[in-house]
Image (tube, helix red, strand yellow):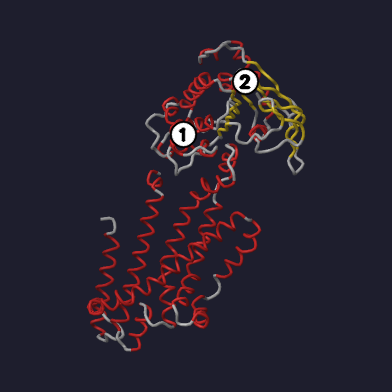
Amino acid sequence: MKNAASIIIIAVFLSIWELGARLYGKAFILPSPIQIFLRFWELKEVLLLQHLPVTLMTIVIGLVISIISGTALAVLMSSRPGVRKALYPILIASQMIPIIALAPIFVLWFGYTIWSKVAVTVLITFFPITVNTFDGLSSGKKDMQELFLTMGASKKDIFYKYSVPTALPHFFSGMKVAVTLSVIGAAIGEWLGAQAGLGYFSRRMMTQFDGAAVFAPIFVLSAVGIVLFICVTIIENQTLKWRDKN
Amino acid sequence: MLAFNDVSFTYQSGNSILDHLSFNILPGEFISIIGVSGSGKSTIFRLVTGLDEPSEGTIFLEGNPNSQRLGKVGYMPQQDLLLPWRTILENTCLPLEVAGLDKKAAREQVQPLLEEFGLGGTEDNYPSELSGGMKQRVAFLRAVLSGNSLLLLDEPFSALDAITRLSMQEWLINQWVKRKSTVLFITHDVEEALFLSDRIFLLQNKPVTSFVEIEVPLERPRTRVDLHRPEILKLKEQLLSKLQSEVTL
């Protein structure tokens, strides 16, 4: 099995954790993996049916907004050098803003609605999508564009038949980063103020000193991140079948 | 077919490459342009394809002066420049798609040609699965499908190994005879030029004001053995010494 080494590492890690937690014996601070799993099983309906859909909704809305606006901005920057010169430095600089510190401002603006969480998610996922797509669109070779020109191709032909396929692998790299970040974004958004969601649930359980119930939604969040990542990889492999032959 | 009339080309930096150059290519001819690196070969190609416009003078394509040349001259670049995400069939359909044909019609037009170009059975392969010689065949077919009888080949075989190169030269001649196209072929290989061409244009001096023009005194069809005739060997010597005098180390 190709992932055997990873599985062994995880198994060893969980075993040490289990052992350490039992020796330590304070489940409200460090619950053992088995305790977390049992607590998850008790809470599975609350977690998966009540809180997961809320968080998932935030993630999906945030990602959709990021993908649409991020690719649009990338296309604009790659086709208009003026726009690129004006916006690219700002885009990079915007990453210096501590987004987590901004999050309370979104609560101020959007209140405890879903939109304050979506705003955090968008802010955190927008950058990798935009920058990767832009780099992809700019990575085309001049020779190739000139070959298209000698065929009488219009700018539109070159864009759709050359630039877009060239950019796709980069776009997917950006997506892989973005989907993992989106989970973090949604969870942070929920910590700050929400009535439901996995992040909110985890935080509420903290105030009740229920260690295992703090961890259980974190495991669900990780699973969501992993599933999203796998989805992107599957779509990527389907779209870029030609890469298998290289 | 193609004529340069007093064409000059100067880069914006003021670097003059061509200075009042004139030449004329007849339909159906096979012409090689030979010269050392940096002698202006690529500039001539860029002018012919329409990627650049002359600073002065007129370029006639099929009798039309300075008309839109982009899309009218089939161009085969040095690297095959095939799109890695398109299959061989899809790659060769590209010029037809650009010309506005829908995918189905393009495929129907290309399919029979694949066989003719020795590419039968490769249509669903990706370029990375093909050998260098096969990729150049695809690139040549793509140039032919750009829909013009004037083909510009820019050192197309320079990246191939010696043996593949020889068989590709013979293959190219067969295609040229069959398709009755006009070929302008850039090379720095004297032997290749002698084997393939009706006339050879040798680039000397810079800026280029005229070519040294050599008619190859060989009948067609030619064989490799013809290259060993005394008059050809002498010609080859002359060409090589002229080229060597151009090389600045």
Disc 2 crowd rating (10 Å Cα; few below 14, some 14-19, many 20+) is some
Residue matched to label 2: B27
- Secondary structure under tag 1 reads helix
Relative to B175, residue B249 above or below: below
Q: Are marks 1 and 2 in contact (CB under 8 Å)?
A: no
Q: Is residue B193 left or right of residue A222?
A: right
Q: Position of residue B88 (x, y in %)?
A: 43, 36
The chain letter for the residue carrying disc 1 is: B
Q: Position of residue B233 (x, y in %)?
A: 59, 14
Residue drawn where x is 42% and y is 65% of the image: A179
Residue B191, quarter of picture: top right
Residue B64 vs A186, above or below: the answer is above
Residue at 57%, 37% (x, y): give it.
A151
Whether residue A106 is situated above or below residue B39 in the rendered picture: below
Disc 1 residue type?
Lys
Decide which of tag 1 and tag 2 comes sooner along the chain.
2
Q: Nearer the viewer, residue A174 or B155?
A: A174
Q: Which mark is residue B135?
A: 1
Determine which quarter of the picture holds residue B207.
top right
Q: CA distance from mark 1 to mark 2?
A: 27 Å
* Observer-nearest of B235 and A56: A56
